[in-house]
Image: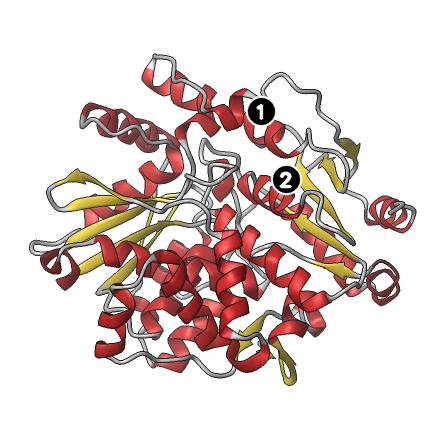
Amino acid sequence: MKLYNLKDHSEQVSFAQAVQQGLGKGQGLFFPQDLPKFSATEIDSLLKLDFVKRSAKILSAFIGNEISGEDVERLVKNAFQFPAPVKSVEDDIGTLELFHGPTLAFKDFGGRFMAQALVQVAADKKITILTATSGDTGAAVAHAFYHLPNIRVVILYPQGKISPLQEKLFCTLGDNIHTIAIESDFDACQALVKKSFDDEELKTAIGLNSANSINISRLMAQICYYFEAFAQLTPKQREQLVISVPSGNFGDLTAGLLAKTMGLPIKRFIAATNANDTVPRYLETGKWEPHKTVATLSNAMDVSQPNNWPRIEEIYQREGWALKSLGHGAVSDEVASETVRELDKKGYLSEPHGAIAYRVLRDELQDGEYGLFLGTAHPAKFKEVVENILGKSIPLPKELAERADMTLLSHVMADDFAQLREFLMNLEW
């Protein structure tokens, strides 16, 4: 598999290099040189396979001969040990539930596959994973890499801007997992990660890697559950399928668009955001004007400068699609809360991220279309928010209950690269 740097096309790397490097020169994202295509007959055959076998074939189509088909299937089997069921919400709308993994969020798929892939390609090298999280990435990455040999993880998150239960899920592990609460917002955390990757001395000294959705292995893993969703639909539902994706850093939407490039017949996609609406405004005006990030009830989407957007533009350009065809909408906290209540009355318990995707989908869905919205996190991960909206208590699943009373092990740090650099250089294995 060959990938090129979107900022410098002359920098070309293998899958193994991309997984270990994370970012290219100038903080450029890696993108596949060849986008594999399946014929309609091949798609039909894939849809008849089980989740693991199908996913292995999808990933092997990208990876090529770098990792054998048998090894790819083994990595997928180790990573995808939980389902991604489609549940019906209305006659013409369903939801793809991606929160049945160990940290109850869609990022378990990408985080766990990346961990398996990194161990496979890195041999015995010592690696430091540095990543920023606006909520769910941290837990998924921490649990995916917990206790893995020769790998240590450092996770930055905005202090006081993720839910207490999200924090408990990944800041109570210890061992090879180190967590830092940064006294700022998610964009500041992301900027600190980027500065670290620009520091060649630091990068080399500690074997720096990233597990954000900027890492291509995470993104590729996420392609697989779009095929899994499609496989669960009836022939009628498949005919005019519209998928609404709650979008923050835009990795999930990128993965869906890559599934479409492979031949999965998805009619169209919708990018649903909260008040951090850089992309919807850009699609309306043609001007890229990020505002200062604002805190919302859907905190995992509190991103005003989404990292994966260049990949989306690359897909549209290479496929010859019109960017204006991408559905979009931004939803306020007030409307998101109303929508959580509306879904609850329909008998479906959601949380603000999923509710936003549902709201924009419901508003844009046309006659004859079938809509799917992504349920990216278990409602209990936002227990306080959901309970305040609904005025009733919701039970904690065991994954959260067993960590709720544990002590946080996080460091607290200012938004200061010099401090972070010193911490990383002095971190013991």
Image height of 161 relative to 48, above or below: above
User: Residue 218 placed where, x, y %?
Assistant: 54, 59
Q: Who is closer to the viewer here, 120 or 420?
A: 120
Q: Residue furthest top?
A: 392
Residue under the point 19% across and 54% down: 233
Helix, strand or loop under label 2 = loop
User: Residue 112 placed where, x, y %?
Assistant: 56, 51
User: Residue 394 placed where, x, y %?
Assistant: 38, 17
Residue 46 seen in this snapshot: yes
User: Residue 132 placed where, x, y %?
Assistant: 65, 47
Foreground label between 1 and 2: 1
Q: Amino acid at mark 1?
A: Pro
Q: Which mark is residue 164?
A: 1
Image height of 223 relative to 336, above or below: below
Q: Of label 1 and label 2, which has the lower sequence position?
A: 1
Which residue lies under the disc numbered 2?
185
Residue 21 seen in this snapshot: no
